Every structure is written in structure tokens, then in C-alpha cells.
Image: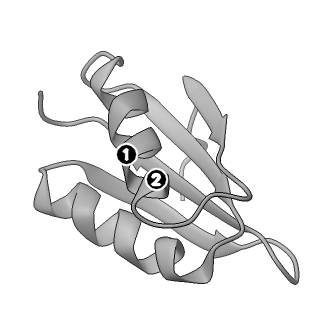
Amino acid sequence: MEEVKVSKSINIKGLVCPYTFVKAKLAIEEMELGEVLEILLDYEEASRSIPKSMEDHGQKVLKVEKINDTDWQLVIRKEKE
């Protein structure tokens, strides 16, 4: 996989749905097309629901990775306003 330059990173650890998606959606709305958002979270359900919701809204999910016992990293590129 090519190296992806992260444009913005948000840490939403400690939040649960729907706040996790709301924060992620607000963050991506502020970004330019083609920019990449990194999301750090510790809520397992959100590690599945955020990528699905982002794809439903036309964004590109580049990575969903469990980085340790409790945390996930999501990397999403903005492809649609």
C-alpha cells in the first residue's frame, strides 16, 4: 500500500455511538477533497459503523486496523462533498 499522508487526525477515544460518527463526519466535512482523515477510537462498534457510514456517504476507507488491545485506527480519504 502506498504511503498515505494524513491531513488531519482526531482522537475520539472514550466516545460511543452516535457521537463517534458525528465527530468523524464533522471532521471530514471541514476537509478538502482528497485530504485524508485519521481517526483513533476505542469503541469496537464504531470501528465497524464509521467505515460503513463513510462509504455510504461516498468517502474512501483506506484502512481499518486494530492497533492494540483497545484501540483502532481508521484512515479515510474525502472523495465527496
Q: Which mark is residue 43?
A: none
Image quarter for residue 70?
Answer: bottom right
From what the image shows, is residue 37 above or below residue 62? Answer: above
- Judge the density around disc 2: few (<14), some (14-19), many (≥20) Cα neighbours within 10 Å: few
Is any atom of residue 81 visible in this view? yes
Q: Position of residue 51 (x, y in %)?
A: 36, 66
- Locate the N terminus and report the quarter of the image it occupies: bottom right
Q: Which residue is mark 1?
A: 22
The secondary structure type at the circle numbered 2 is: helix
The residue depicted at 30 percent of the width and 27 percent of the height is 34
- Locate the C terminus and report the quarter of the image it occupies: top left
| 12 to the left or right of 60 | right
Q: Position of residue 17 (x, y in %)?
A: 45, 66
Q: Are marks 2 and 1 in contact (CB under 8 Å)?
A: yes
Q: Which mark is residue 19?
A: 2
From what the image shows, is residue 38 above or below residue 56? Answer: above
Image quarter for residue 62?
Answer: bottom left
For marks 2 and 1, give the CA distance. Answer: 5 Å
